Image (cartoon, rainbow, N blue to C red):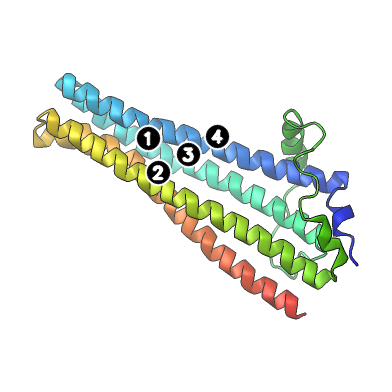
Amino acid sequence: MNNIPQEQNTQQQLDKLAAQRQLYSDAKALQIISVVISVPLVIAWSISVAILPKMSVYAGLWGIIVTFLELLIFSRLQNSTQEKAAKIQQIFDCEVLQFNWLNLNCGIRIEPETIIDASTRFKHKDPNYSTLKNWYAVSVGKLPIHEARIICQRSNIWWDAQLRRRYSKWVIFVLVTLSIIVFLIGLIGGLTLEKFLLAVLAPLTPAFVLGCVNILSITKLQTDLIGSEKMLRLFYKK
């Protein structure tokens, strides 16, 4: 009763999915870099200061530099890349599920060159797009278009929400664990207040900034998901 199963597997739509996957992968790579310089190195600096107290000044300087890098470069690049990926997903959904882009108030469409570049890079990992085919269940093709829309979009919302919740719990767990480890190292090392500030709190700052940025991002995305679900209900009534 609709052509969703056929349309989602056309080359044009698979290119969009490939671009979306690649951009999310790029954002994840940036996040991994942020985590590496914000988490494991914090423990390394704390141990170094406990053994060599003269390193405390360098530990504090490192914490300040990494904090600025996270705020001014990594978080901005990551958010920008994720927004592009989400926008490409919106384009895919509009075309496959037969939504009107202007009615959804999605803003400016992503340039075709961005999609081509990202999908080309994804082809190195999956030349045949085997992991992208049948993005939505083939069975939705038997439903009226308005029912198929709500089922497909609700599956997107549920899947994304689950990932966000799991990730937010992981971020909180890592921050709490890291704080306990670093504070214990500081106590065992018998650091003075000055050295504690430089060797413990300053190096911890990038990790807390990373955690706060990610938690705020997750909160915003969950709010957007609720808004998307309300919009879907509106379209379902139509």
Q: Secondary structure at mark 1?
A: helix
Q: Which numbered disc, 2 or 3, marks the residue that appears first in the sequence?
A: 3
Q: Is residue 35 left or right of residue 95?
A: left
Q: Which numbered disc, 1 or 2, marks the residue that appears first in the sequence?
A: 1
| Rendered view: 177 above or below 164 | above
Residue beneath disc 2: 210
Q: Which numbered disc, 1 or 3, marks the residue that appears first in the sequence?
A: 1
Residue 238 in picture, x, y percent from top left? 77, 80
| Rendered view: 154 above or below 77 | below
Residue beneath disc 4: 29
Q: Which numbered disc, 2 or 4, marks the residue that appears first in the sequence?
A: 4
- Find the distance from the CA under tag 1 to the CA under tag 4: 14 Å
| Rendered view: 51 above or below 181 | above
Residue 117 in picture, x, y percent from top left? 74, 36
Residue beneath disc 3: 73
Residue 194 in picture, x, y percent from top left? 12, 35
Amino acid type at circle 1 is Ser
| Rendered view: 58 above or below 38 | above
Task: Please name which of the two marks, 3 or 4, marks the residue nearer to the observer.
Answer: 4
Q: Is residue 23 left or right of residue 43?
A: right
Residue 198 in picture, x, y percent from top left? 19, 33
- Find the distance from the CA under tag 2 to the CA under tag 4: 14 Å
Query: Is residue 150 in view?
Result: yes
Amino acid type at circle 4 is Ala
Residue beneath disc 1: 38
- The quarter holding residue 107 reads bottom right
Amino acid type at circle 3 is Ile
Disc 2 crowd, CA 10 A, few/some/many (<14, 14-19, 20+): many
